[in-house]
Image (spheres, rainbow, N blue to C red):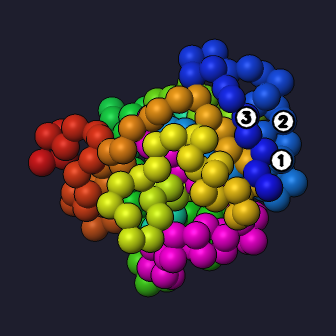
Amino acid sequence: MAKYFDVHPESPQPRTIGTVAASLRSGALIAYPTDSCFALGCQLENRDGLERIRTIRRLDERHHFTLMCVDFAQLGQFVQLDNNVFRAVKAATPGSYTFILPATKEVPRRLMHPKKKTVGVRIPDHAVTRALLTELGEPLVSSTLILPGEDEPMTQGWEIKERLDHVLDAVVDSGDCGTVPTTVVDFSGGGPEIVRRGAGDVTRFE
């Protein structure tokens, strides 16, 4: 049964955030809000959590997982950026963008695309997510909470708790955070390729 945490959207309670972070360190899989929509998340080294995300979403090995990072310094530990990409990504963060980039050795192989050796990264503009990432001290392995056969992500914390109570360890709810996922930009080929048009403004990458 998943624990339910009601968190203030702008001033998240430190004690609650600390409790959620502790559960992540103990191997929990959580649903949590971001600046685009709800996501599933687990700790970087949590193999079981990763497989549980794959099972819930029915993902194959080619799916790009996202490392949710608290700031640009942390993001830079996990992906390779040349000067042009560095400037483009930095100018668009924090925000509702996911960037596909070549992974560094800090990224476990199981999180990389099996052929391209790439991974998704992003820096959210959401107080609850950023508080959780700060407390955790490392990225969250994440994937948008959209269930198989459905067209849009889930938007209500209580509904997530109700429908996924048996497969999650915790639900962090700070209110409705929308149905539009991030804009995904692939920089692994050098220049920007817009893979998905979402919440982030695409004009800067066209």
Q: Residues within 10 Å of mark 3 (few under 14, many from 20)?
A: some
Distance between the Cα atoms at labels 1 and 3? 12 Å
Which amino acid, mark 3? Phe
Disc number for residue 5? 3
Which amino acid, mark 2? Thr
Q: For residue 18, what is the image quadrant?
A: top right
- What residue is disc 2 on? 19
Q: Residues within 10 Å of mark 1 (few under 14, many from 20)?
A: some
Query: Does residue 24 lie above or below 47 as drawn?
Result: above
Q: Secondary structure at mark 3?
A: strand
Distance between the Cα atoms at labels 2 and 1? 6 Å
Residue 50, image x, y percentages: 66, 68
Q: Judge by depth and name the residue closer to the eye, 72 or 179.
A: 179
Distance between the Cα atoms at labels 2 and 3? 9 Å
The residue positioned 33% from the left and 35% from the top of the image is 92
The residue positioned 63% from the left and 20% from the top of the image is 8
- What residue is disc 1 on? 23
Q: Is residue 59 magenta?
A: yes
Question: Is 13 positioned to the left or the right of 93 in the image?
Answer: right
Q: Secondary structure at mark 2?
A: helix
Which amino acid, mark 1? Ser
Q: Marks 3 and 2: in contact by CB < 8 Å?
A: yes
Residues drawn in magenta: 35-63
